[in-house]
Image: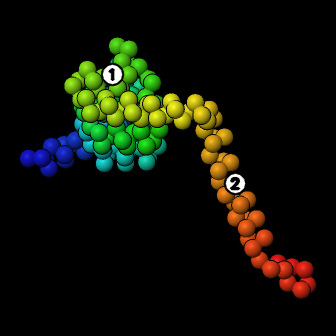
Amino acid sequence: MLLQEEFCSLNQLMECGEAVNSPGDALGQTPAHLAAHGGQAFFLLWQLQTGVDVNQQDLFGETLIHKAARCGSLECLSVLVAHEARLDVCNKDGLTAEALAFASGFVECAKYLATVKHTQDTFYKTCPSMQHCKEPTAGTKRRQCDRSAAYGKRRRSDGFL
């Protein structure tokens, strides 16, 4: 029975539209919205890897993370957080995904989203520009490696390393 339900969900996802970001139904929901709302983390991940806009809103103003929070899928929420879904987007009722999860009775999901939001807020306060934080670390490591290679070797008698 469960396998048949999963097959039907896959059919629904595939029939929603040709382009990954085109609204597949009258409510503006993409196949990724349906995957998130159905708790189908595998299909959601596949859709995200094909270029889905992780923050695209449907006619209710809900993004993929709202849909995952509404159904209480921690797996989908973690996939969306890993793909940098915005946690501060409000739907047309003014609810964030965290508030929606809490209102729907999914306390674990709400706690997870609150923790991620707190972590992100703390990180962005210490490093306002994500690009600024990532590049110097990599560059610093390369420079340190270059220095250690240059200073750790003995010079040949002809002056070359």
**Residue 128 in which image quadrant:** top right
* Front position in the image: 84 or 14: 84
Residue 69, x across and y down, in percent: 30, 30
> Circle 2: is it few (<14), some (14-19), or many (20+) Cα within 10 Å?
few
> Circle 1: is it few (<14), some (14-19), or many (20+) Cα within 10 Å?
many
Residue 32, x across and y down, in percent: 35, 37
Residue 86 is left or right of residue 40, and the answer is right
Residue 27, x across and y down, in percent: 32, 23
Q: Which mark is residue 50?
A: none
Identity of the residue furthest to the left in this view:
1
Residue 79 is left or right of residue 107, and the answer is right
Above/below status of 130 relative to 57: below
Which mark is first along the chain, 2 or 1? 1
The number of callouts visible is: 2
- Residue at position x 28%, y 26% from top? 101
Q: Amino acid at mark 2?
A: Thr
Q: Amino acid at mark 1?
A: Ala
- Residue marked by disc 1: 99
- Residue at position x 12%, y 47% from top? 2
Residue 47, x across and y down, in percent: 38, 44
**Residue 96 in which image quadrant:** top left
- Residue at position x 36%, y 18% from top? 95
Q: Quadrant of the C terminus?
A: bottom right
Label 1, secondary structure: give it. helix
- Residue at position x 33%, y 21% from top? 99
- Residue marked by disc 2: 140
